[in-house]
Amino acid sequence: MTENRDSILDIWGPRTPYFGEWPERVDERTTEEPDHWVQSACVLCSNGCGCDIGVKDGRIVGVRGRAVDRVNHGRLGPKGLHGWEANNSPDRLTTPLIRRNGQLVPATWDEAMGLLVAKSKELIEQHTSSSIGFYTSGQLFIEDYYTLGVLGKAGLGTPHMDGNTRLCTATAGAALKISFGTDGQAGSYADLDTTEAVLLVGHNMASQQTVLWTRILDRLAGPNPPRLVVIDPRRTFTAEQATVHLAPRAGTNVAVLNGLLRLLIENGHVDYDFIENHTVGFEELVKTVGKWTPERVEALTGVPAGQLQAAAQILGTCRTLVSTVLQGVYQSMQGTAAAVQVNNINLLRGLIGSEGNAILQMNGQPTSQNTRECGADGDLPGFRNWDNPAHIYELARLWNVHPDKIPHWAPPTHAMQIWRYCETGSIKLLWIQATNPVVSMPELGRIRKILEQKGLLVVVQDAFLTETAQLADIVLPAALWGEKTGTFTNTDRTVHISHKAVEPPGQARADFDIFLDYARRMDFRDQDGAPLIKWDTPEEAFEAWKACSKGRPCDYSGLSYARLSAGSGIQWPCNEEHPNGAAHLYPDHQFNTHADYCESYGYDLVTGAETSPEAYRAHDPNGRARLLAADYEVPHEQPDADFPLWFTTGRVVYHFHTRTKTGRARALQQAAPEAFVQLAAEDAARYDIAEGDLVEVASRRGRATAPARIGGIEPGLVFMPFHYGAWGQAADAPARAANELTLTEWDPVSKQPHFKYAAVRIRKTNA
Amino acid sequence: MHLGNYLGLLESSEQQLTKAFEHVARKHRDEPDIEQMCRKLSAWSREHRGRVLPFVAKYSEEKSDEPKDLRRDLFSEKRRGSLALLRDLHDLWLLTQEVQLCWTVIRQATLALRDEDLKAACAYCQPRTQRQTEWLLGRIKQAAPQTLLVAE
Ligand code: SF4
């Protein structure tokens, strides 16, 4: 039994200052002495820390960080050190369940899959495969996603496949496509080791990717620390370390960013050579940001003009710059427009594609990068362009199916629309995997109603009987991480293998095996009558994925299970040109915007309308990055007399997603057992609320109740963490899920829902 | 000179488009993206009309009577369900075409007339009408297969 640091009390652990390299520090926590270790990586956030799983007598007994891994150099955070306990939880699902007479009762796999297949066939017969939808996850493996993508796109031929990644990283993908032509992060985590400045926009890295944050803390503790600019309406752990902290009002990111862009231009802090040779759109950008003087920004956003200037000074004079973006941008009004303006900052300065320079449009979930890459969401595999017939033919050749089998008549249906089709009754079978929309989607009252609707068959594949699984008609018990083999990729393109360490409990099965079983039973065939899915093992699936990715930006062709197992994480692209992976995309400032190569022809940032192929080709950027400007727009719902306060949601350091795993790890659960309502002292006084008082927050859509936590937030704004649902609550307790309150509304470009603003009112409910 | 007539036609078609977008936003408020976007695009048309009005006054002498109700039998209240949405978007698209053509015609005349202010108004509004059309077309393409092939 080892626990070499208390990550609950000291989240980031002892400082190991950076002197020319980031020192190793191996964090370990086991509850018993393992009899062997199995190579893996953590799946509790998008950081992807390399770790080994300790096994004793066929049970997981702990983890330790992998010192050799490029992502974490041995470190693990609280979630990584404790989250594995969920695998051993006594309430794992161990057998399929089928709803009979209103009750979920145990069934065999044959019964459950037989029912699913019979229903699928009946629906296809009567309503075409467009009556079947998939709502998948950002927590499966490449092998799962690619198999799912192929069976959905070339087997069923349904356009309705998306993931909860729509809630977490759709905007990252959209912003990268818009600026650079395809998805894919330009830089690396290692750029944090040398950069002179870090800009964090709506990204509480200290709580979200705790190990990445230690990389910054270690820089701050060494010589030549980077200067930090943090844009966040709350005084987060991240903001506390900022050189300059800008705290704008909800929904005003674009105004702040336009103000910064304007100052860069006005101060002459732009690289005109780079702009001239490697970008398009500068003139339009200058026009759009021109009116955002510091005074105007201050009036609208509440950010003092002097602070904006101080931030612009840092961003304008640093010789290297890492910019990072997360949900505070993605889930706000104008998410894509704002994320693109962050890209524009690095582009104006020409700081991209070399050491110390990175733009990290962060992912939320551990494997959401792969949902996007493998086509298990609203994208096509290998960052292909649904609107480019040549890309569709490539896939058709690869899968040996007729091109028209692959839905490409319109963009693949995004998750919010999938739910809407369920609501109107035109999707009649919804298969949900490894996610818990009854807690994580906006406007939960509506989601419950949809799932309870007659005429919608709900299939839930999960390891636990989540709030969502409880509403299912068929429940498929799934293996967790550590119980199956597969690969996945973190935000900075590092690919890890995670080996199976132990058997899943009872009859639970790997997601991969469930998808294969479905494909076999549905008897999906290619054009020559051979089985469509030509692989049986995860490794064979990985080989198939390599072939699909070859020649595309996310090229995996130089990787193999053997290579990944012999070392540790390796970045894509990994191919003949980059046998050991590439730390930077675009080192020569040639971007992926060529009409024949790009993943998207672009969007109207205001309406979301897709640019036509003809219009794009007429002005083919041909390898130049696109500077796309956007003006500020007023949020659709604003505080008024009835609902006078702004509302926003976010996370706490000890939990992931809807606590399905972290809530079952004892120490994490104890560290953050309950939701809370955070509000400013001014607002607390106005409503006569003291620390710990029960507060009911109400919006036009619902209510949620939790104890008050006072301070650390701008007046007029109320915050709740989104992790907490009904699970673990007394049956008669009032609802506490933040998403009871949120809006059903989404970004016009990325279709990511707006979790970061709503109008609410509050009242104390203590007797 | 018939410029006044055409400006009148443009003014009334932008007005109708304003109302039509509003109407569709209200009628389909259960479709969150439709409601928000139609409100926004309605505001664009309202703004366009505001920019046209001074020119309608300026060139009004030349105007001959030609009342025209483009709404005709568009936006039938009887339509229900997802087909109603598709048909309503279809009708909106038709209206934007009328507006688009008006702008084109007027812009041609403006070039010959050398009315710089009117030219600026054309340069500002016409691309936005185009963007209205593009959004509608994209949304129509998305809705079409599901609406026509899968029953609710
Ligand atoms: S930072 Fe993320 S990946 Fe690393 S240990 Fe923590 S939760 Fe796991």
Image: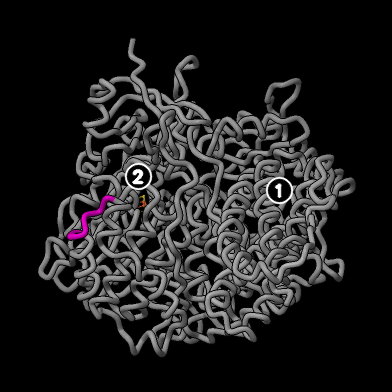
Name the residue: 34% across, 63% down.
A257
Relative placement, left or right, of A134 versus A12 is right
Figure colour scheme: one colour
Q: Secondary structure at mark 1?
A: strand
Relative placement, left or right, of A586 versus A106 is left
The reply to whether residue B42 is in sight is: yes
Magenta stretch: give its range: A302-307
Residue B12 occupies quadrant: bottom right
Which residue is nearer to you in this view: A95 or A337?
A337
Q: How many marks?
A: 2
At label 2, counting other C-alpha atoms closer than 10 Å, the crowd grade (few under 14, some 14-19, many 20 or more) is many
Residue annotated with mark 2: A79
Relative image position of residue A261 (x, y in whole percent): 32, 70
Q: Nearer the viewer, mark 2 or mark 1?
A: 1
Which residue is nearer to you in this view: A679 or A203?
A679
Q: Is residue A304 magenta?
A: yes
Name the residue: 18% across, 67% down.
A226
Relative image position of residue A76 (x, y in whole percent): 30, 52
Relative placement, left or right, of A765 versus A104 is left
Which numbered tag is attached to residue A133? 1
